[in-house]
Image (cartoon, grey):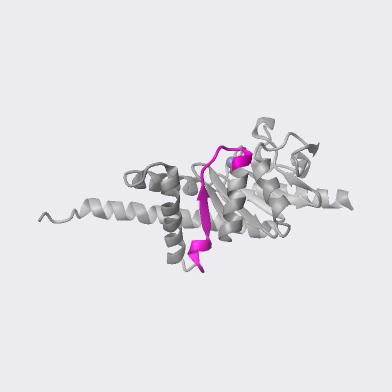
Amino acid sequence: MMRNYVSVAREEVAAAAVALYNRGLNSNTSGNVSARAGEVFAITPAGSTGILKGNIRPEEVSVVTMDGVLIEGPKNSSEWRVHATIYKNMPEINAVAHPHPPYVRIYTGAVAEELGNMYRGIEGIIPKMCIMFGEAGYYLGADNPARLTAIVAGKSGSQDLANMVLAEIMSKGVSTVVMFGHGTIAIGENMAEALGRAEELEVHAKIAFEMRQDRLLRKGRNPPAQA
Ligand SMILES: [Zn+2]
């Protein structure tokens, strides 16, 4: 029975990694994605294995315990802690997608730069950035855009970062979290839900970024009249 769960989860993870690659949310070597398989979970391998996510096969997917012990497959992703922390604390969640999507990274970087004049330090910038992401959702007609995403900053692969991501999900009821300057965490009861949320967030970030560029261009073309 256990074996069965595991092979289904590995197939799901391989298909999801290919999908993230094909949708342009991830490069061949970055990001990771996982699926719960009973007491363990299947997760994409470490970048150092040289396995490319654009055409990864199920047998190239790692299987690890909730404490990060590798039990099958190649060396697992160093970012397993975020996945394990979510699975351990949220029994209803069965899939976690963590791509490094270009527009999520560009947009948060651009907004941080813009807000940098007004706020000191990333801690001050983050709440304001969440509001701006919310605005993008609002224009798209998303329901309750404030619940769309939260933003955290922390060291990649650390337990601190995993705890921050979990705290944002639990306290704000969000299903996507942006790790600043890094990428997206999208959770789901199943893989389709996690992938859909990761993709939606990237679309919102792209629109928000293009709207911002358009606003800046117009401002440049029509400078305010001098008093
Ligand atoms: Zn990452």
Q: Is residue 209 left or right of residue 167?
A: left
- The spot of residue 65 in percent (x, y) is 78, 43
Left or right: 12 with respect to 19? right
User: Residue 92's quadrant in the figure?
Assistant: bottom right
**Percent x, y for residue 132?**
41, 56
Frontmost residue, 125 versus 16:
125
Q: Tally the numbered discs.
A: 0
From this viewpoint, which residue is outermost toward the right?
1
Q: For the point 52% across and 56% down, which residue is it?
A: 149
Q: In this view of the protein, which residue sits in the foreground, 85 or 58? A: 85
Work out whether residue 89 can be spotted. yes
Specify start and end residues of the magenta stretch as a single range: 143-160
Q: Position of residue 123 (x, y in %)?
A: 45, 45
Where is residue 142? Give x, y as percent: 50, 67
- Asked if residue 158 is positioned above or below residue 167 in the image, the reply reads above
Within the magenta stretch, is there residue 84? no
Q: Is residue 21 visible?
A: no
Residue 184 as seen in the image, left or right of residue 126: right
Looking at the image, residue 134 sits to the left or right of residue 45; the answer is left
Q: Is residue 157 magenta?
A: yes
Image quadrant in which you'd find residue 68: top right
Quarter placement of the C terminus: bottom left
User: Extreme left residue here?
Assistant: 227
Ligand 1, image quadrant it occupies: top right
